[in-house]
Amino acid sequence: MMDDSPLQVLTVPTAPYPDQRPTTAGGLRRKVYVFQSRRNYLHNFIQSVFSSIDLRDRQGSTVVVGGDGRFFNRTAIEVIVQMAAANGVGRLIIGHQGIMSTPAVSCVIRKHKAIGGIILTASHNPGGPDGDFGIKFNTANGGPAQEAFTNKMFQISRSLEEFAICPGLRVDLSTLGGQQFDLENKFKPFTVEMVDSVESYANLMRNIFDFAALKELLSGQSYKIRLDAMHGVLGPYVRRIICEELGSPANSAVNCVPMEDFGGLHPDPNLIYAADLVEAMREGPYDFGAAFDADGDRNMILGKHGFLVTPSDSVAVIAANIFCIPYFQQTGVRGFARSMPTSAALDKVAKATKIELYETPTGWKFFGSLMDAGRLSLCGEESFGTGGDHIRENDGLWAVLAWLSILATRRQSVEDIMKDHWLKYGRNYYTRYDYEDVDLDAAFEMMEYLENTIVDKSFAGQRFAVGDKIYQVEKADNFEYTDPVDSTISRNQGLRIIFTDGSRIIYRLSGTGSVGATVRIYIDSYEKDDISQDTQVMLAPLATIALKISQLHARTGRTGPSVIT
Ligand code: VG1
Ligand code: CO
């Protein structure tokens, strides 16, 4: 227990690291051993976060801390608590056992008017001693820090000379409630509140959806669902909301115990890494299935027999059925948005409903700015992220509740809802190729070569033929975005080739990997009437063209993608 003398605040000298540039999602992702073996690597990053917040805003402020429970989560939280106290933060709100999903952190930041939140996660990347660890900072609106902020963090991290810490401060992560600490030279005690991670979030969901209607769907014997939390953070949320509150039987939720290594699983909800769920859906009696990533912001939606709803289609279907969700009946629909590489399925719904459509760069932070300005209600990314303006993050369980609301209203199967949608709007066939762990220099050189090739004047108008398919280039560029709210310009957001029929090939380097480079190729092709083909067969000609133009295989020494989604 604490003795009565105030805790000491120390300033500790440190040496800066050159490589703490935040990622697409506003954080730092590295192999666990990097955090363990490099002296003060974590401390430096956390100090850069706090130093980027104006001292007047920081003094006495509230900060939220959560994480997906992966290996190193606890160690990191102990350091963060000690450093928050030493940096003038007045109160920390921490999820019980240090665990809280990314959407819940966003919700709690907003609810308690915190100046921000620190989330300990590497999202969908594997965990455990040999896996990845990550830290990201969300600002007062509840969303990932904007570029101006992360640039400041990076600047500070490169010249950091010292950090502040309260080494004697020990917090108990297992006991709910408040804990107070007296610090030397501080007038007010420093407070830590250990909160139930699920409660605030569950409350928010109750106000968005019609829980009575959902309960009727889920508590009956006839409708069967299977939700897979992949041993990430969402298990307790699924159990509490879907099983206890909405009455779905306990066995409809699997892998619901958060684990430090996710039980050896790769907590990424797609057909490859959620193979168990896909298998169970194919053979089992389930009408609806979903999986989530480690920190609970991503979702994959499946129908009976494993019918996949692609994330790009998912957001379009929710948009087309948006008034099945009571929240939107109240707020109205202000706008739709998708990231640039996401398929244009949402655009068709926006056009038909005459609702504004925004095309943003990859990463959730760009949606937040539009939501804060009251211009955006619903958005999504092809990378299994879907969400509304109730928070400033993508929200896996919200997406599931949105789909269940549509299913409860329409009483059709997932597959029939999807097919009706394609009949009405046409279909955007869509695929993504990921080349992981590519040599860094080779990847950058390939992108440079590609950019030089496609921005050349002679490129527009060129025709590419594969079999009997001919595609003509309409335009090609390096995507640039001007934020319609504050006019901030974001350049270099992906190379796009757009063909005359509207088909698109997009190339991007990932900003969330932890080793080497990940090259992503996205292919999107629209068919008005031909809606029942196999995606990979349909897109094979464009894939061939994508590889030919980029010379990707020759330039990286690879023979095929690591993952196709
Ligand atoms: C990826 C996805 C992007 C997503 C980001 C964070 O980024 O492509 O759509 O916003 O991950 O998702 P990148 O730069 O690797 O392509 V999450 O679930 O890590 O918060
Ligand atoms: Co995530």
Image (tube, grey):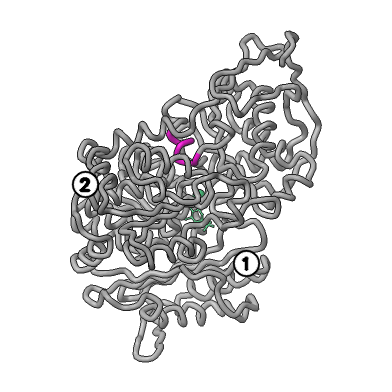
**Which residue is disc 1 drawn over?**
444
Secondary structure under the numbered disc 1 in the rendered image: helix
Q: Is residue 120 above or below residue 379?
A: above
The x, y position of residue 141, in whole percent, is 44, 34
Look at label 2 and name its amino acid: Cys
Magenta residues, start to end = 101-107
- Left or right of 153, for residue 401: left
SS at circle 2: helix
Dot 1: few (<14), some (14–19), or many (≥20) neighbours within 10 Å?
some
**Could you tell me which residue is drawn at 66 percent across and 54 percent down?**
131
Image side of residue 317 versus residue 54, left or right? left
x, y (%) of residue 441? 68, 67
Q: Which residue is mark 2?
A: 324
Give above or below for 536 relative to 7: below
Q: Is residue 476 visible?
A: no
Which quarter of the rendering shows the N terminus?
Answer: top right
Q: Residue furthest toward the front?
A: 221
Q: CA distance from mark 2 to mark 1?
A: 45 Å
Q: Is residue 484 above or below residue 63?
A: below
Front position in the image: 135 or 522: 135
User: Can the viewer see residue 329?
Assistant: yes
> Magenta-highlighted stretch: main secondary structure?
helix
